[in-house]
Image (cartoon, rainbow, N blue to C red):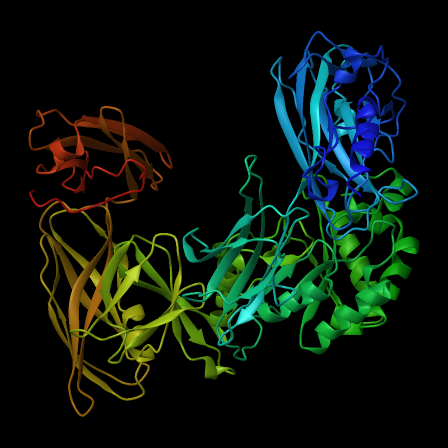
Amino acid sequence: MPAFLPILVSLVLEGVTASPALPAPGVPASLQRVAGRFDFEESTRLRLEMPLGFKRVTPMGVDSFTSFGTMRPDDEQSHDGRFSFRFDLDGHSMAARSTTGLLPIRTGTEYEVSGWIRTENLVTARASMAAWLVDAEGRPLPGTVIESPAIESRGAWTRVSLFVPGHDHEGHDLVLECRVLQQVDRGGTLNDETGEDISGTTWFDDLAITQVPTVRIDDETDTGIHRQPDTPRLRLRIDDPTTEPIAWTLSIANTEGVVVDRHEGTMQLDQLDTWVEPLLPANGWYTARLTARTTGTDSITRSDQVNLVLLPARTHTAPVATIGLELATPPHDDELALIRELGVGLLSIPALTGSGTGVLEDEAHRRRLGRYLDQGGRIACRIDRLPPSWSQQHALDEHQIAEYLVLEEATWGPVVDRSLLPFGDSASSWLIAVDETRTDPRVSGSAQALLLQRLKTLAPEASVDPLQDAAATTPRQLLEAWRVGAHRYITPPWTTDDRGRVRPTKFYPVLHTLLHHLSGRTFGGELGLGTDAWAWYLAPMDDQGTAGSGLLVMPGVNAVVPVALGTAPIKLHDTSGNHRLIPLRNGTHDLAFHQQQMQFVEHIDDAVVRFHRDLQLDPPRVVARPQRHPHMLEVSNPWPTTLEATLQFHEQPRLQVTPSRIPMVLSPGETRRVAVEVLVTGPLAPGVHFIPGSLVRSGAESLEFPVSCRVDVGLPRIDLVFTEVVTAKGVRVIMQATSRDTAPRSIEAVIAGDGLPTTAPRRFDLAAGATIVHHFNLVGTRTSYAKHAVYVQVAEVDATGRVSHAVHFPDDDSDHRVTEVPTSP
């Protein structure tokens, strides 16, 4: 064999001008990373109209005529060396493609295709490269066509690269295409003002095809969902055609991007194929990334990642009847598995296919959705656009659904019948998208009536409702609908990754937790837990009392607030499914509030919480005038026995309740209104205040726990909001005043405090219902204001009412409202 090697090398080098650059002599091609290179330097020895190995073609994916413009080797511009490949536009798109058989590949290997592109005078056209694998007949393999980003470099050489997947494909050759595409051929629309580019130049140079390591990371599931107490296992695979050592790293990060576990090693001669059990500290969403880096001179880095979720152990909960998922297409098996683990019991699916048939007419869809219905799920069929063949019947657009339903029952009626027949009432909930800005309400009503009449012939319990404008995207949107019993759909919390795997998003565990804690419960009112700290009381349903009551703690300020929620430890859940016990200390539980995250509380004393919720002033607003203000205090007895107790309010600076000590005897379920006065003795900060106190229950069931009564301080029929924003010179205080009066109102405001010059108040006249915004600019730093009290005082003109907003110097990235009571009047 050694005797033949010099002859072989000599023959190969003689053909180098007609082929890509070949491996170095004496080294097997199977161990070389560079599988091909085009530097176009063959034109230094040969007069060529086209570079060797390339032919002019219509760009892949373009059907229009594209023979305008010229292309040739060029020695006026090059990235390296003397020659490059030049395209001169003259309208339409252009492409040149390597010939089939020029770039044979190794089966099961992935390739990087890279090169340098330079453009001049392109307006809307863009340059790019594309590559794909072909079979032995030269036909492109599905799933392997990759295109680089579109380039417009304005005279600069720009490197582009793309990776062609070959690990899971039986490819025979690789095909490379250099292209310049007009805007319309890139999926855009033709601009009437600029049109297609009829001039402009693009150069390609130093194209390379490089074998790269194949990196794969997978878990044991098709969906990425794991349950406690099982531990996820990750399979790591690295396959490389060369013997070059590869350093690899496995990192697992949580939803905040913090790396919670890390593994690393070096792959030598053998391919890597191993299993790892990562250490996950808690339930939640994680992303696991496997990175491989070659250790040679020209380092190559490749990576793959998989997203997964670790959920608590499975517990049976009934689906929330009003919360569902809005699916863009009928679910396949992996999506149904994600739906099942999520615990959602309602799906909105498209009723029609693009060809005008019913989705439920398809046998595979019927089979999958039938299993979902058998497990207790419900579906709503959604008509949100017309198939093209339907809209064209009457020159309608795809959103004129109501008009079509009124005109063409002969077409849609049989489709509805065939869709409904297999399932009957189980698929009798239908939704129609109606554009209220374009559709006559009478037409909309007629369309819904026609559809409902058709449905009821096969499903007596059928219903037709208007479709919401858009699916919800946040938990708060879901909750606002749930609290009033309205149906609301949300986009599915999963995506399909680059390898075609369905994977959960960061929102998946949040929605799972939300559905779990809302199951079997209803909205029972709001509970104030402190300034800017709120919770929803989750009351158990009458017929599903096993869930017990709970609290949904809303996002608020980052603070720890002592709250009396019973006489035993409570359980606090985060949105990832983790929980911890909060002990009772001095009669209260210390709840840590988060600015961005909701939380759930269980094991509360239901009667204590309801007593807090129902203790309130009527009217709730206290006018900021130094005088006695008459109010009614509402007190309820949530216990099943008679309440003999004393309600004691504590005196507060500038705000107190009289009488401060209120004895009471209430029968079970009784509510009593007690006349009290709220005494204001000085300026108060606008907004929510809590007057603290305690309830001392006597008798056999003696009990004492802290309570608080919420009051809303402000000026009569005027809402004030203050915001602090850091500026280059100090801080800006933004005051917004809104009148809720039916008559004109006037206020005056002044900023005052230590070290500030005395200024006259500024008057603001507010028309009925009007809003004014005014800025107070302070010069200084956080340090200069640290020891000084500065506040904005707002008063009614010709009245004694006055509120006082203490100015807070915010963090540089903070612009939220901060309202405090100043320590000095």
In the image shown, does 346 or 612 lie closer to the viewer? Answer: 346
* Residue 564 seen in render: yes
Residue lying at 42% horizontally and 74% vertically, measured from the top left: 539
The picture places residue 123, in percent across and down from the top left corner, at: 69, 15
Q: Is residue 68 left or right of residue 38?
A: right
Say left or right for 518 vs 329. Answer: left
Residue at the (68%, 52%) spot, across then down: 499
Observer-nearest of 371 and 76: 76
Residue at image location 82% in from the left, 58% down from the top = 450
Residue farthest along the top direction in this orientation? 76
Tell me where residue 189 appears, x and y as whole percent: 75, 26
Above or below, comparing residue 214 to residue 12 in the picture = below
- Report the front residue among 365 and 607: 365
Q: Position of residue 632 (x, y in %)?
A: 23, 64
Q: Quadrant of residue 640?
A: bottom left
Q: Establish if 225 lies above or below 217.
A: below
Decide which of 610, 248 is in the foreground and name it.
Answer: 248
Asked whether the viewer can see residue 492, the reply is no
Q: Residue furthest bottom?
A: 700
* Vertical position of residue 305 compared to residue 102: above or below: below
Q: Quadrant of the N terminus?
A: top right
Q: Where is residue 485, by image quadrant?
A: bottom right
| Position above or below: 769 against 682 | above
